[in-house]
Image (cartoon, helix red, strand yellow):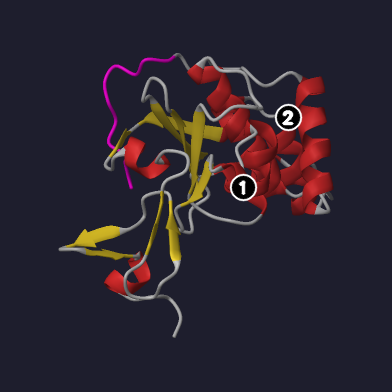
Amino acid sequence: MADSRPLSPPPFSFLPGTAPDPRRLAAVLTQSSALHGHLCPRQLLGVRSALLAGQLLGLDFPRTDKRVLVLAETDGCYADGLSAASGCWLGRRTLRLMDYGRVAATFVDTRSGQALRIWPQTDLRERVRAARPEGQKRYQAYLDAYRNWPDDQLLSVREVELNFDLAGLISAPGQREVCSSCGEEVLNERWAVRGERVLCPACLSGAYYR
């Protein structure tokens, strides 16, 4: 749902050699690993992606408000890292899953409309394996690299334009209707009006269950 074509020039600087403050990173990783039950490489990538997004957007992370919307392109470990570092959660309606099976996320400043898509560099794992000390297991090499390498050696960043109505996705508090077909309540303006009938997405287009 996000167009990944580059815009020129990008409105942010991505300086080589930068990395998050080690104490701040350690605090977020402690929270993320407690939530997830252990610390793993993809959590680290989620945390690093979110911390970089906050830096580039000029916003403090983790957020306690709803200014930032995160569109995660996979679930699991990476998404937990994103949430721990950004403060954006499914339950707060500030994290959405775009199930593309890709370790990537788009961070949207809902006030300005600026959106940054961040993902691990394509050859990252190969470079980590090539750089690992002799005898070190690959899993530990990934953990060490994803924790310590600078941002420009880990991640790619691109400004994107969203191809959907952001205000419509977010909706407004208290919006609800009752579906004319199934009789269930529909929240967040997710219904459609067909003539005089209000229909939920399941009755309009078919549900994922039967």
Q: Which mark is residue 148?
A: 2
Task: Count up the numbered dots.
Answer: 2
| Mark 2 residue element | helix
Q: Earlier in the sequence, mark 2 or mark 1?
A: 1
Name the residue: 46% across, 58% down: 99
Give how far across and how far down residue 157 sits, in percent.
Answer: 45, 30
Q: Main secondary structure of the magenta part?
A: loop
Between residues 124 and 21, which one lies in front from this camera angle? 21
Q: CA distance from mark 2 to mark 1?
A: 31 Å
Q: Is residue 199 left or right of residue 121?
A: left
Give how far across and how far down residue 146 sits, in percent.
Answer: 69, 37
Q: Quadrant location of residue 19?
A: top right
Q: Which residues are magenta?
A: 1-12
Which residue does the numbered mark 1 point to in the structure image? 91
Task: Check disc 2 and give the amino acid type.
Answer: Asn
Name the residue: 59% across, 27% down: 65
Whether residue 172 is visible, yes or no, is yes
Tell whether position 11 is magenta. Answer: yes
